[in-house]
């Protein structure tokens, strides 16, 4: 289930964005592991969150892996961003994927640091 959040933009125009039901759990896990988390889902056509981890920034799009594939597709604007972004970008679909991603990035950071 997606949660819809309504807020007002600078011109007091109502804006609606959807938050995947697993977003809170996944971002809470990232915080517990020590990542800094900034939710940016309200920015149209951008990712759901920016994570600071191992002296790097990670752009993370969150999808709910429990939903059917048709409900996990990127929106048009999300797809445009993904196709045109020249930096790091990832899509994570579960708490286990969040843990695996952060664990892998920590391992890569420690290996690079030891060289």
Image (tube, rainbow, N blue to C red):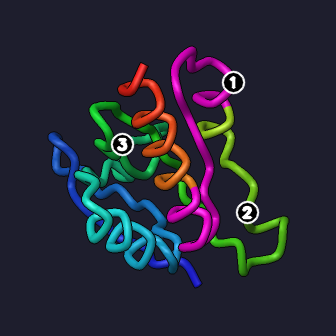
Q: Classify 45 as above or below 91.
A: above
Label 1: how many residues lie within 10 Å, few (<14), some (14-19) or many (20+)? few
Residue 85, position in %: x, y? Answer: 56, 20
At x 35%, y 33%, the residue is: 57
Residue 92, position in %: x, y? Answer: 60, 57
Residue picked out by circle 1: 83
Q: Distance between the residues labelled 2 and 3?
A: 19 Å
Q: Which residue lies furthest to the front in this view?
A: 115
Quarter location, residue 64:
bottom right
At x 68%, y 36%, the residue is: 79
Frontmost residue, 9 versus 37 = 37
* Magenta residues (range): 80-100
Residue picked out by circle 2: 72
Residue 113, position in %: x, y? Answer: 36, 26
Circle 3 or circle 1, nearest the eye:
1
Label 2: how many residues lie within 10 Å, few (<14), some (14-19) or many (20+)? some
């Amino acid at each position: 289930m997606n949660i819809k959040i309504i807020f007002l933009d600078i011109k007091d125009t109502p804006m609606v964005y959807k938050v995947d039901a697993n977003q809170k759990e996944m971002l809470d896990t990232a915080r517990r592991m020590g990542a800094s988390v900034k939710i940016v889902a309200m920015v149209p056509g951008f990712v759901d969150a920016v994570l600071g981890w191992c002296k790097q920034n990670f752009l993370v799009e969150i999808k709910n892996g429990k939903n059917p594939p048709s409900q996990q597709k990127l929106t048009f604007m999300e797809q445009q961003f993904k196709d045109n972004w020249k930096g790091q970008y990832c899509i994570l679909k579960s708490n286990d994927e969040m843990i695996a991603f952060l664990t892998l990035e920590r391992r890569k950071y420690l290996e690079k640091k030891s060289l």
